[in-house]
Amino acid sequence: MIKAALKSQAIETPSWAYGNSGTRFKVFAQPGVPRTPWEKLDDAAQVHAATGVAPSVALHIPWDKVDDYAALSAYAKERGLRLGAINANVFQEDDYKLGSVTNPDPAVRRKALGHLLECVDIMDATGSKDLKLWFSDGTNYPGQDDIAARQDRLAEALSAVYERLGDGQRMLLEYKLFEPAFYTMDVPDWGTAYAHCLRLGEKAQVVVDTGHHAPGTNIEFIVALLLREKKLGGFDFNSRFYADDDLMVGAADPFQLFRIMYEVVRGGGFVPDIAFMLDQCHNIEAKIPAIIRSVMNVQEATAKALLVDREALGAAQASGDVLDANAVLMDAYNTDVRPLLAEVREEMGLDPDPVAAYRRTGWAEKIAAERVGGDQMGWGA
Ligand code: LRH
Ligand code: MN
Ligand code: MN
């Protein structure tokens, strides 16, 4: 039962994690990074081959702009992959200095909306189910713009996009506390995202990026609540020590990841409807093994969450036994699930050690020799 659940889990990797990235201080180029979206898929295929549970790749438009998206989708399919969420990007053009869909200038708003609608066209061509929307929109200074009017403009754009969604397509709205705007973000938190999604309808759901909260925020509470309201669309997994650090998921706080995954399991959300996506940048570590490692970290947290003795936990909770209830959860968390996952992998015909398996392929050496002048994710240069 636990093994079957682990075998069925699907973790989506982001195209941008394969390319060069960095901070605003420096991008350290790595040998062999992909030069095109096609090569990003080649790398993603390595991650899926090693782990068996990373069958889809999220695209970011225009970072992954190609002439023929159906061909890109077919290329993915030939490699045992599919194209996942389409991430819209309305944050990198000069026009968006004062916002995209919330910009005071209607011409800029129209341009931004045009891009979002184009992303739905791309979904039609790729067969992607999810449109992921994150807006850098916001203000830096009190009085800079009308906070409520910006919400009206946001609602108007979201509803135009929502109307355009086809059958089986969803809109995932992502929130972020701050950055790049420092006074107000227009979608700063789950409540704002939830309020917009609630008005839009059932095809609109919230995406929780684990790096997008104030320090100390109880993310698993947000997960439990959104699941209960049927408004949890998925995750952008990564980990953070300070702000939106985009480090490997499970690296900074594996216990938090476990607590989040427990709420997912508890809330019945361990189903294809919840998109488990990574949103990370590997600035100094080798990218493909780091992505493999991240997938493994999600699997470990999931295995521990599945191991929680729900019956014993329920009994302890019902009898008000605080210590026992906590102990049941901690017993699961403190279990070494690596042998279990090794068995799962062997049963799937995989090497029990995905990183070692990847290293043995010689892929890293091959791409370092063949690819010259790798791409970068689109920022931080
Ligand atoms: C914003 C964000 C969002 C973007 C991605 C590259 O900080 O989390 O999901 O699309 O980073
Ligand atoms: Mn994100
Ligand atoms: Mn982010």
Image (cartoon, rainbow, N blue to C red):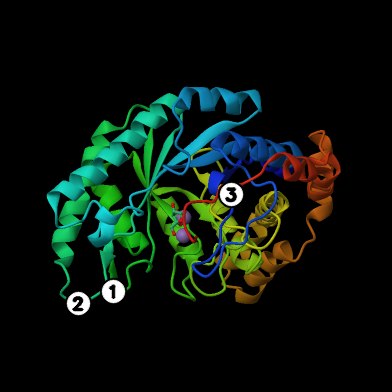
- Residue at the (23%, 47%) spot, across then down: 199
**In this rendering, position of residue 338 left or right of residue 265:** right
Seen from the viewer's position, the closer of residues 308 and 282 is 282
Q: Which of marks 3 and 2 is in front?
A: 3
Q: Evaluate if marks 2 and 1 touch, with contact meaning CB atoms under 8 Å apart.
A: yes
Point out residue 371 in the picture as x, y percentages from the top left corner: 68, 41
At x 14% / y 66%, what residue is drawn?
A: 146
Question: CB of residue at label 1: within 8 Å of ligand 1?
Answer: no
Q: In which quarter of the image is the N terminus?
A: top right
- Mark drawn on residue 142: 2
SS class of the residue under badge 1? loop
Among numbered discs 2 and 1, the one appearing first in the sequence: 2
Residue at numbered disc 3: 19
**Distance from Cα at disc 3 to Cα at disc 2:** 37 Å
Pointer 1: residues within 10 angstroms few (<14), some, or many (20+)? some
Q: From the top left corner, tell me how far across and down residue 10 is, in percent.
A: 61, 40
Camera-nearest residue between 62 and 149: 62
Give the percent coordinates (x, y) of residue 105.
Answer: 14, 54
